[in-house]
Structures are given as structure tokens and as C-alpha cells.
Amino acid sequence: MATDTLSITLSALADPTRRAILARLAEGAATVKELAAPFAISGPAISKHLRVLERAGLISRGREAQRRPCRLEAAPLAEVAEWAEEFRRHWDASYDRLDEYLRHLQREERNDDDRT
Amino acid sequence: MATDTLSITLSALADPTRRAILARLAEGAATVKELAAPFAISGPAISKHLRVLERAGLISRGREAQRRPCRLEAAPLAEVAEWAEEFRRHWDASYDRLDEYLRHLQREERNDDDRT
């Protein structure tokens, strides 16, 4: 298991339930009970997901014994976006190639129309 | 193990060696031998990393039996960037709070200077 910050963040994000929890917390703090409600999984399973997110610094938890509301900590996501953005010219390039190909098809089609 | 595309991509990226391989391929196609050179790990270990990246659709491999050069396939990274960008206002907000705090400190400092 990699132990650098970015790997820990990416590994914590590699689960749809954990990403859904972060999306929910982006709308505001929530208790474990509130977070568990939309998912068809057990309380302990949610708690395990929250521990993974907390260890990755993606959420923080209040200290009030009863509620302990969870809050989004978005800073590690900036590092993820920054890392992925480095590759933008590469995915842009593939879109450009696709664009060029579609324009080529349209030209072919127009030429066919001209001939008819 | 989650099996949705984004989870598979994030899981493949959660390793510094695999991210370094993608950074190298961003500069151009390379053979397994060329990719292995900068790393102090065995050929089989590199091959295992390449299989993970290939399964995630992050690289493709040529079909020539001897060389089989690897190429970057950046499209899945667009999905990662797009997902993380959704949270930009949250990390911008934490930077804003830090900014405000630093300006507050500077004002305090100026006030102290005025009093001396």
C-alpha cells in the first residue's frame, strides 16, 4: 500500500459510496445517521467508510459526543485536480482528433450531396 | 472492490509508480524496458503495474510482438479532473478563509507598528 498523501487520497476516493458521502457533505455538515440514510448499507459499514475518509483528511468530525457531525475537508481534492489537469493537453488532443474526424465525415457527406 | 469506471481509474492511480509511468508516457510512447529503467523494481513488478493501468484504460499497448510500446490514454483522467473540479468552490473557500486570516494578522501588525 502506497503511503504518500496523493495515493492515500486517491485510494480513499476509489469507492462510489465514499464519493457520494463527500458529495453530500459538499452541501453541508451531516451526522453519521444522516449520511447513512440514502445508502442500503449498515451503520458499521458507513462508519468504516468515514474512518477511511477521515484518515485521508477528506472529512473532519465534530467533538460533541452525541452528534459528532462530519464536515468536508476539500484541500486534498485540490491536489487531485491539479495532478489530473497536468494531462489536459493529452485528453484535449484526443478530443481534437475526434473533432477533426467528425469534420472530415461532414465534408465527405457534403461532397456526396454535391454529387447527387 | 468497486467496479465502476471512475473507481477503477482512481484505484489504478493510487500508486506513485503508476503515476510516474503515466507522467513518462505523457512525453511519448515507451517500451516496458524504457519504462522500467528509472525504477528500482523488477521487470515483473513493472509488468504488473502496466496490467493495472491497461485494465483501467489509462494505457494501450502496441501489437508488435517484440516491442509492444505503451501509450498514454488520457481520457479517463478527464473524468477524474471533472469530478474533483466539482469541489473547487470548497477548496477555494478554505483558501479565502486563510487569506482573510493572513490579512487580519497584517492589520494587527500594522496597528502594533502605529502604536510604537
Image (cartoon, coloured by chain):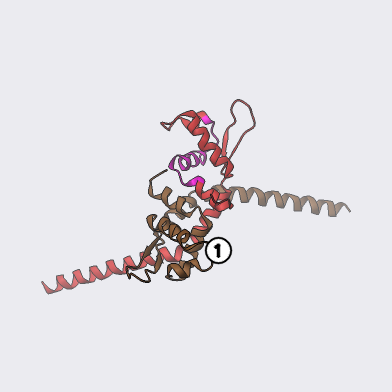
Chain colours: A brown, B red
Residue B77 visible somewhere in the drawing: no
B62 relative position to A12: left or right: right
- Give me the residue at 53% from left, 57% from top: A16
- Give me the residue at 41% from left, 50% from top: A8
Residue linked to disc 1: A40
Q: Position of residue B33 (x, y in %)?
A: 51, 28
- Give me the residue at 33% from left, 69% from top: A65
B25 relative position to A54: left or right: right
Vertical placement of B63 versus A6: above or below?
A: above
Q: Position of residue B98 (x, y in %)?
A: 32, 65
B50 relative position to A32: left or right: right
The reply to whether the magenta stretch includes residue A89 is no
Looking at the picture, tell me which residue is in the foreground, A78 or A60: A60
Q: Amino acid at mark 1?
A: Ala
Q: Could you tell me which chain the residue with mark 1 belongs to?
A: A
Q: Provide the residue span drawn in magenta.
A: B12-32
